[in-house]
């Protein structure tokens, strides 16, 4: 089945609206993928995100961009059940929709591009940490949100893996996506738990925050830190030996592949675009492109940094922000 998207041939320059869930340095690498794809395939991309997670703000932005003539719409599904109506409205207007980073498979979107399930990522982090600390140890866990499904799933998976390994997990309240509060929390937790053997945080900034606190306590190299994502600060901490490993979910490609998919759908129609990519237009909820994460350690950091340097990813991370 083909939907009546508003494409009018290949000559017209498309406008794609990208609605993310919040603002932060994590999205700079995702957006670098979007920008590279937009430059390669000749379309304009507009980014929008609430400062902090707000489904209502996301839905309002999606409706505004559809009404404003966007040729395609991509969004991060902060809550699965919240976007059914606005995606249906976009479909009625002939605007194809994809999700990335977080999915809402039953909302009517054409395709999801992103990571394995958050629980799987949390379990992977737990298994990595269990290789570095003995059974009976105590480790710290932090989160930037108590309500985000991605954060909750990662923490759940991490705790499950720790329980299987016989390792105790202690943690404080969520920091509300505030780096300063995350730093205060980890300093307090380290002071309250002087025997801690490892740390894990579900948001990208936690690894570098934890590394700084461990270094400040004079315990660099003693406390094994497992991170998520690969911000420049995380790479620097791996290079210093303060972070043992970080799980890079390859978020650059979330933007890159989602951009390719939505541009193709806007040009050809959703049905043809999905079939050309090997997906089923009749079973939209099954259409997922989940990328395999890579574990970055000191052993392969140089390879990662070469990849980032070739694309200017870290330079754009330092220079750009969601607007």
Image (cartoon, grey):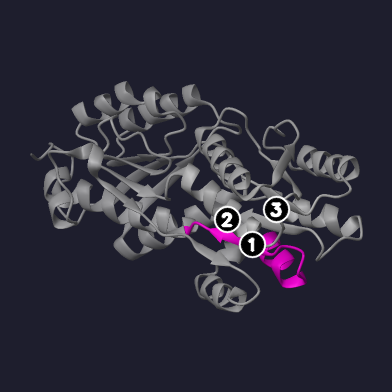
Q: Nearer the viewer, residue 148 or 14?
A: 148
Q: Secondary structure at mark 1?
A: loop
- Residue 210 at what x, y percent from top left? 77, 52
Asked if labels 2 and 1 touch by Cβ distance under 8 angstroms, the answer is yes
Whether the residues at callouts 1 and 3 have beta carbons within 8 Å, the answer is no
Determine which of the numbered discs, if any, sits on residue 127 in the image. 2
From what the image shows, is residue 81 above or below residue 181? Answer: above
Say which element carries label 3. Answer: loop
In this image, 228 relative to 38: left or right?
right
Looking at this view, name the residue that lies furthest to the left. Answer: 1
The C terminus - image quarter: top right
Separation (CA) of disc 1 from disc 3: 10 Å
Point 86% across, 50% down: residue: 195
Q: Is 233 contained in the magenta span?
A: yes
User: In the rendered image, which residue does mark 3 sit on?
Assistant: 135
- Looking at the image, residue 259 sits to the left or right of residue 2; the answer is right
Lateral position of residue 176 relative to residue 218, left or right: left
The residue at the point 19 percent across, 56 percent down is 277
What residue did someone put label 1 on? 131
Q: Is residue 115 left or right of residue 205?
A: left
Spatial CA distance of label 1 from label 2 is: 6 Å
**Number of other residues with Cα within 10 Å of mark 2, as a class: few under 14, some 14 to 19, many 20 or more:** some
The span picked out in magenta is: 231-250
Per the image, is 125 magenta?
no
Give above or below for 133 relative to 64: below
At 51% from the left edge and 74% from the top edge, which residue is drawn? 307
Of mark 2 and mark 3, the one earlier in the sequence is: 2
Residue 50 falls in image quadrant: top right
């Amino acid at each position: 089945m083909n939907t009546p998207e508003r494409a009018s041939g290949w000559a017209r320059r498309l406008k794609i609206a990208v609605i993310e869930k919040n603002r932060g340095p994590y999205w700079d690498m995702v957006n670098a993928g979007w920008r590279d794809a937009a430059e390669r395939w000749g379309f304009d991309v507009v980014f929008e995100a609430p400062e902090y997670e707000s489904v209502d703000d996301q839905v309002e932005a999606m409706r505004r961009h559809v009404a404003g003539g966007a040729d395609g719409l991509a969004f991060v599904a902060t809550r699965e059940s919240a976007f059914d109506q606005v995606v249906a409205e976009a479909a009625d207007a002939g605007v194809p929709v994809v999700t990335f980073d977080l999915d809402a498979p039953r909302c009517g979107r054409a395709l999801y591009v992103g990571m394995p399930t958050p629980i799987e990522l949390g379990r992977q982090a737990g298994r990595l940490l269990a290789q570095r600390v003995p059974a009976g140890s105590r480790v710290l866990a932090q989160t930037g949100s108590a309500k985000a499904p991605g954060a909750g799933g990662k923490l759940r998976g991490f705790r499950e893996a720790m329980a299987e390994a016989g390792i105790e997990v202690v943690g404080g309240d969520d920091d509300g996506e505030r780096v300063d509060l995350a730093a205060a929390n980890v300093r307090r937790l380290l002071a309250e738990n002087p025997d801690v053997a490892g740390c894990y945080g579900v948001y990208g900034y936690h690894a570098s925050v934890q590394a700084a606190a461990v270094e400040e306590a004079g315990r660099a190299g003693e406390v094994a830190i497992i991170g998520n994502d690969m911000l420049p600060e995380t790479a620097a901490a791996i290079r210093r030996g303060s972070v043992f490993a970080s799980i890079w979910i390859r978020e650059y490609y979330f933007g890159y592949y989602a951009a390719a998919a939505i541009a193709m759908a806007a040009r050809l129609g959703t049905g043809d675009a999905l079939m050309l990519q090997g997906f089923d237009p009749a079973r939209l909820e099954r259409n997922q492109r989940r990328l395999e994460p890579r574990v970055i350690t000191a052993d392969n950091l140089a390879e990662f940094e070469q990849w980032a340097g070739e694309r200017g990813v870290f330079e754009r991370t330092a220079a750009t922000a969601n607007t």
